[in-house]
Amino acid sequence: MHELPVTQSILEIAVRNGSQANARRVTDIYLVIGELSSLIDESIQFYWDMIAKDTIAEGATLHFRRIEAELMCNDCGERFPHNREDVSCPGCGGRNVKVAAGDEFFMEAIEVDGEPQG
């Protein structure tokens, strides 16, 4: 259910930027979501279809790009794919690791269509 407030924020940003660009409508929104994020693409899309009605973003296509999880060893600096069962560094065997990629969530781009009518 936490996708609803996230989707509301996406809509607010899209409408604000579209309005500032004097757009007739927002056509496409590009989102980047890390694998470790608990956000679900289908849930965001579901809420989007409901809350974007009667805005300049109604009908905009949401594009989702997922980033794979990657860890980095704090001891030797090696970066490696996240394995949910074992977080040991393949280089030194250490477990002093941190997330290097995969926890992202941001709007990468917004595309708009022309000048407003009227």
Image (cartoon, grey):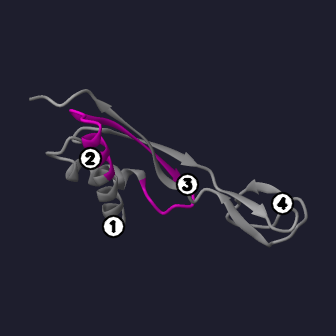
Crowding at mark 1 (Cα within 10 Å: few <14, some 14-19, many 20+): few
The residue closer to the viewer here, 80 or 104, is: 104
Question: Helix, strand, or loop for circle 3?
Answer: strand
Question: Helix, strand, or loop for circle 2?
Answer: helix
Q: Horizontally, is 33 left or right of 70 in the view?
A: left
Tell me whether the residue at label 1 lies in contact with that at label 3, contact meaning CB atoms closer than 8 angstroms. Answer: no
Tell me whether the residue at label 1 lies in contact with that at label 4, contact meaning CB atoms closer than 8 angstroms. Answer: no
Q: Which residue is mark 4?
A: 77
Is residue 46 visible in the rendered image? The answer is: no
Q: Nearer the viewer, mark 1 or mark 4?
A: 4
The label on residue 15 is: 2
Q: Quadrant of the image for the C terminus?
A: top left
Say whether disc 3 or disc 4 marks the residue closer to the N-terminus: 3
Q: Which residue is mark 3?
A: 34
The CA distance from mark 1 to mark 4 is: 37 Å
The CA distance from mark 1 to mark 3 is: 18 Å
Q: Horizontally, is 90 left or right of 66 in the view?
A: right
Q: Is residue 95 above or below residue 45?
A: below
Say whether disc 1 or disc 3 marks the residue closer to the N-terminus: 1
Name the amino acid type tagged 1: Met
Q: Which residue is mark 1?
A: 1
Name the amino acid type tagged 3: Gly
Q: Horizontally, is 32 left or right of 70 in the view?
A: left
Residue 28: give x, y in percent of width and height.
Answer: 35, 36
Residue 103: give x, y in percent of width and height.
Answer: 57, 60
